[in-house]
Amino acid sequence: MALRIVFPKLTKWQQDTHEWLGDPYQSGKIAVIKSPRQRGKTALCVVALIEMAVKHPGCASYVFEPTLGLARKVYKSVEKSLSPTGLLTINNSQLLEIGLSNGSTISFRSTEQTSRGLTVTGLLVLDEDAYLDEEVIYELLPLVNVHKAPILICSTPFIKEGHFFDMYELGLSDKNPLVKTFDWSKYPTTPEFLSPEQDALYKQTMTPQKYRTEILGEFLTDGGLLFEGFDDCILEEEAQVDDFFIGIDFASGKGGDFTVLSALNSKGEQVVLERTNNLAPMAQVDWLAGIINSLASRGRIRVIQAEVNSLGVVYIDALRKQIIYPIYEWTTSNESKRRIISQLQLAFEQKKIKIIGDRTQLNEIRKYEMQINAKTKTVTYNGAGNTHDDTIIALALAYDAYIAGGGALGEIIFI
């Protein structure tokens, strides 16, 4: 008896991509989808993954997302589609792995998880590619080489640089017939995916930059989702050391967070940026104390400001036993975060700060966004797609210490 799986009817833009892919098994094809929000990106990925698994017994497909939460969301979509078929033999909601009776598997992962030892024999999906860590992307790409596995690259657009933009451009050219770009933003918006009421709500609650990328599906031409002008604030050469105004953001102990120390000099120029996420809790304190005491031999420690939430209070108490400099405690709240982020935002716009051109720091700055709750009108600040903001918070705390500690004013006013 023939097996029949019923998929939802594909839209014109989904169908165009699906037809070009055909049966891409061992074809080496790469489809690049630039899509606004709510255009059926996940639905097409689900169809492509299931078709690959059913048609080619024993193949292994992988989906990589920026966060584990997004990986779990796609896992649930695939699991829901396969549950009525009786094909499932593995349905592991902890490891996010699905196995079929024909031996095919589909695994769902965050790019924060290791990819060592993996081989893709089915389909590789890089979802929200513009928000994936580029170093991880280039670790993943060799996974398809042995079996010429196809790749489905999907994302809402971001800036005009990086892996996603490069692949988008390549797919528009005729340089490689195996790579093709599908720009779903060029298709008319239908009420099925975005009603006029939803559109009006997004205009009201999103920043103009985020509305452009997620709703209009356009690349940003300058700046980031929230911060603007920071590209003109990158140091061209190492800044001179005199005084140190230090900000510390402690890792929460989950989600791959980093503990970050950032320091500015008396001119508001970033002279230190250090981060770690592979040390035991008390080893982090030793690490921070070593950096601070070393800096004291090079200049004057003016102000240290550290985030006190979660494990921060424990770290600060332990750190105080190893250094002689006072530490001001900063408690996270919507208002306290709004204040230091707005302050940093203005500093970039007015060119009152200079920063080290560190790749991780610049990526976090570009992907930082403001969100407004439609019901409560509460404003929150976070990294887009749950990307990290550790270096931003440490930098914002350092700049706040600089302003309050006399770096710009000549007198201590920190409270």
Image (tube, rainbow, N blue to C red):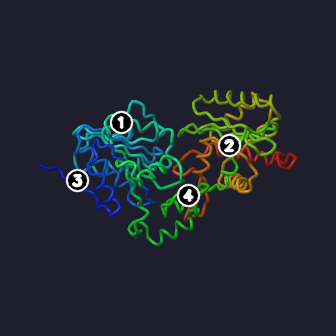
Q: Tell me the tag on residue 337.
A: none
Left or right, residue 407 beside residue 188: right
Q: Tell me the tag on residue 394.
A: 2
The outermost residue toward the left is 1
Left or right, residue 325 beside residue 377: right
Camera-side mark, 3 or 1: 1
Specify which label sits upstream in the sequence, 2 or 4.
Answer: 4
Are the two marked residues, 1 and 2, in contact with CB atoms closer than 8 angstroms? no
Q: Residue 90, image x and y in percent?
A: 29, 39
Tell me what residue is drawn at x 36 percent, y 43 percent.
124
Camera-side mark, 2 or 4: 4
When the figure is inspected, residue 393 is found, relative to residue 286, above or below; the finding is below
Camera-side mark, 1 or 2: 1
Specify which label sits upstream in the sequence, 3 or 4.
Answer: 3
**SS for callout 3:** loop
Q: Residue 35, image x and y in percent?
A: 43, 58
Tell me what residue is drawn at x 49 percent, y 69 percent.
199
Left or right, residue 72 beside residue 344: left
When the figure is inspected, residue 190 is found, relative to residue 373, above or below; the finding is below
Badge 3 amino acid: Ile
Specify which label sits upstream in the sequence, 4 or 1.
Answer: 1
Label 3 CA crowd tier, 10 Å (few <14, some 14–19, many 20+): few
Which quadrant would residue 402 be assigned to in this image? Answer: top right
Are the two marked residues, 2 and 4, in contact with CB atoms closer than 8 angstroms? no
| Residue tagged 4 | 220
Which quadrant would residue 206 be assigned to in this image? Answer: bottom right
Badge 1 amino acid: Asn
| Residue tagged 1 | 145
| Residue tagged 3 | 5
